[in-house]
Amino acid sequence: MSNEKNVTRNAWFWIPSLYYAQGIPYVVVMTVSVIMYKRLGISNTEIALYTSWLYLPWVIKPLWSPFVDLIGKKRKWIILMQILVGGGLAGVALTIPISNFFQYSLAFLWLIAFSSATHDIAADGFYMLALSQGEQSFFVGIRSTFYRLSMITGQGLLVILAGFLENSTGNIPLAWSITFFILAGLFGIFFIYHKYILPYPRNDYPAKKSESESILKEFAKTFVAFFKRKNIGIILGFILLYRLAESQLVKIASPFLLDSREVGGLNLTTSEVGLVYGTIGVFCLTVGGIIGGIVISKKGLKYWLWPMIISINLPDVVYVILAYAQTANLLFISAMVAIEQLGYGFGFTAYMLYLIYISDGEYKTSHYAIATGFMALGMMIPGMWSGWLQELIGYKYFFIWICIATIPGFIMAKLVKIDPEFGIKSDKK
């Protein structure tokens, strides 16, 4: 077969670029859109509500993830979704300058979100099919790193660019329109590169075992198998509550940095937010992810779970400090955000690997999608009320609430069961 020569292609050629591409649309939909809408005059309540609804494709992606498993190859799904994401980004760029931009741009963000969620299903399945368990443990930090680099590009460099264009053109809608056209062009490059560089794993084939079995039957089996797992209640509780605090913080962090001091914000410019939160912060988050992947591959997920859940939650207190200090010192603000993001990157590694751990089995692609669907639900629902709550009680009390909201995650970490050997990289071939 002509594809046989590509089966053993070095993972370094495709994992970095694949997860870089996977991160861009997600960060655009979930974070960059928040900054954009804030700059375009939308309220915190509306921003948090409507951008949290954009999590829905990731919540319900298990409903179509079995079809990704059962129809076609993961490789083909990846290529197709990258085309659709690029088209959606161009659509946002075209609608920003027009009247009713909020509704129209949200429609294209929905297209991006659904395409990105489907891309996630295929890419994560491709990752598990193409790599051994030991390689998965090793590359979980690498893929996280390039996912975070996409965040630096999206909410860092491109936000800085948008801020520069805001100042140079004096036209905020035009500045953001140009920024989204650049993103659309970037996805054109991803499509061309991955069409030729992705390997062809021998086991990348539809999961359906027999032509006599219906797709609907296989569809049902994937769900039944997942929910029949031992301790499924604890598993779901852990997935939903591990990031309860972060799910609310992420929707308000950028508005807090951008808002005026009169309403409790820090009054940073768009470019400063891109530098502090989108570049310095994400760089530290990336470093945390690299370290997390390395240490887990040596001693396993169970050993590192508690240090990592402490790491992801305890640093949230820096936002309480910033809200009360109301400092104008950009270096101090950057240091506080860097501390929080470093801890988050380190702690999130355990969460990612736990999802892989509970997804192992015949339908690993679909089961991982189901797990990440619950992960998105855990981000969506708390995020929806976060803007309303912040405007009700103010930034100071909101960030105190964030610290309180970390408690359920610690409780669930105490209850989960993990194989002590899982995640340890083996030298055996």
Image: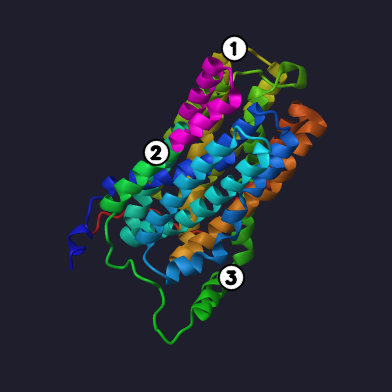
Counting from the top left corner in percent of width and height, residue 361 is at: 43, 69
Q: In the picture provided, is 46 more to the left or to the right than 334?
A: right
Chain-order first, disc 1 or disc 3: 3
- Mark 3 residue type: Phe
Residue 360, numbered label: none
Between 328 and 424, the one nearer to me in the picture:
328
Numbered label tally: 3
Q: In the picture provided, is 208 more to the left or to the right than 113?
A: left
In this view of the protein, can residue 293 be seen by the observer?
A: no
Residue at the extreme right of the image, as rendered: 392
Chain-order first, disc 1 or disc 2: 2
Q: Secondary structure at mark 2?
A: helix
On-image quarter of the N terminus: bottom left
Range shown magenta: 154-183
Q: CA distance from mark 3 to mark 2?
A: 39 Å
Which is the main secondary structure of the residues drawn in magenta?
helix
Compared to residue 302, the image places residue 37 above or below, namely: above
Q: Which residue is mark 1?
A: 329
